[in-house]
Image: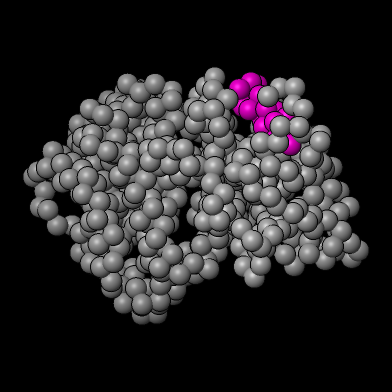
Amino acid sequence: MAAALELRCWGGDWGLPSVHSESLVVLAYSKFSGAKLTVCPIDWTWKTITASVPELLCGDAVVQEPAQILHFLRKQRFNADYELTARQGADTMAYIALLEEKLRPALLHTFWVDAENYSNLTRPWFASRSPFPLNFVVPSRQASAALSRILVTKGEAPLHRISEVEGKIYSDAKECLNLLSYRLGKTKYFFGNSPSSLDAFVFGFLAPLFKATLPSSTLQSHLKQLDNLTHFCDNILAVYFSAQNPNGRQPARQPSAQNPQS
Amino acid sequence: MSLAAEAFVSQIAAAEPWPENATLYQPLKEDQILLSDCASSLAVQAYLRMCGLPVQVVCRANAEYMSPSGKIPFIHVGNQVVSELGPIVQFTKAKGHSLSDGLDDVQRAEMKAYMELVNNMLLTAELFIQWCDDATAAEISRPRYSSPYSWPLNNILAYQKQWEVRRKMNAIGWGGKTLEQVYEDVSQCCQALSQRLGTQPYFFSKQPTELDALVFGHLFTIITTRLTSGELAERIKGFSNLLSFCRRIEQTYFEDKSSST
């Protein structure tokens, strides 16, 4: 805890502290567990192409990948899962696997492969936040990485074309959203009254889909119909990322923050 | 399959009852089949036995190529061919046999989440150990995978499969993992399963579901298969309730089959 924690991530827009799902997961978890992070957005720097995002720096240690970063924070005694039972911890692992398998391919497709969304929203956003000449390179590199990830994991052997898998990944994603909605029910967070790492993961995956101004997305309209999930995202934004601390730099339990919905 | 084709197949499936001559195809058991395929095949066999549906197991060297999606196992029922546990569960549901009808929405969500956990962790770990660990790949996986074919086809096919699996591992971020980390992931997955199972006979209390079949298929195969190092089996044997779970399912549904695979 002596060394300062610094997080490198993509910057924010659309009312979110970051537009990148994995960075959002780490930011949300740090707020839930009370870890003070210095947020260094990599926008407009050469790190847009060299760094793997999100990245946590603590003294000499460099940690990448959200799961590893959360594990590191827990070892530094920032633990939002302290009150979970063993069974709830097991459920957390299972639901995170569900998100990764069923929802992530569709999110990658919506933002990076769908032609209308990519050319009208994603590419201009990422290109405008990369320095010249990287603005020509960064978005297309991420798009081709997204496409190959979808094809390699979901494309079936003889059919290496994206159109064959599109229908399947979107129906899987809609089913995943429905399952999350059933599980959340009417409660505020997934396990009781205080948020945990599962809430951070769900928030990180859902918030960009909910808040981005996508020109065309059936998945976004499906999400907007699931009221409890949209209230879940809005609630976390209002309580932990309100206007007083937009970057999420102050711990969650500050009494001076005026949150009308808490 | 596209959504329209799936709906069409379901309709056709619903029209006919389960025939007596349904067959399940897998690669050759003694020489060719690998850990991950054997686990998937055993999971499907367990599921069909739990539903009380008769099926004959047939071994073919080219089963992987016959399968519509390239994955093992697949079943041939009437004039339809369906591969992989997920679609097979939907197919049997269209014919009116289902194990998870008694679950409510929240339980069904949990069941699907745990099935994804097994696929995400256990199956990926099995593939990693088979194809990304050089010792296992050279001693076991490549020779077994290519055993029905003669030179030079056997080398070409084995290396092609290895390249494909390594590409997939890189795409999902497992490319840089060490064997120790993979064993650790498997332990955590088994701990989650063990805690979810607790002292109950099945994951959802009294009746087995497709989750039980899937977990049984993977765990039983790992425990009973000899690899270059026995560490994976040892880690799983550390969870006594999972061991008794496997034994119970084996005795209940496979009592006429010999205990070793």
Magenta residues?
A222-241
**With A143 as the anchor, is B65 left or right in this view?**
left
Where residue B45 appears, as percent x and y from the top left, is: 24, 43
Quadrant assignment for the N terminus of chain A: bottom right
Residue visible at 40% across and 72% down in the picture? B133
> In front: A35, or B2?
A35
Rendered image quadrant of residue A234? top right
Query: Which residue is the extreme one toward the bottom?
Result: B151
**With A147 as the anchor, is B259 left or right in this view?**
left
Where residue B9 appears, as percent x and y from the top left, is: 43, 31
Rendered image quadrant of residue A253? top right
Tell me if residue B203 comes above or below residue B245 in the rendering.
above
Residue visible at 37% across and 56% down in the picture? B186
Secondary structure mostly seen in magenta is helix
Q: Is residue A235 magenta?
A: yes
Quadrant assignment for the C terminus of chain A: top right
Tell me if residue A79 comes above or below residue A257 in the rendering.
below
**With A213 as the anchor, is B118 left or right in this view?**
left
Where residue B235 appears, as percent x and y from the top left, is: 28, 59
**With A210 as the anchor, is B32 left or right in this view?**
left
> In front: A174, or B200?
B200
Where residue B97 appears, as percent x and y from the top left, is: 29, 26
Residue visible at 57% across and 49% down in the picture? A78
Tell me if residue B149 comes above or below residue A257 in the rendering.
below
Q: Is residue B25 magenta?
A: no
- Say if residue A74 shows up in the picture: yes
**Colouring style:** one colour
Disc tally is 0
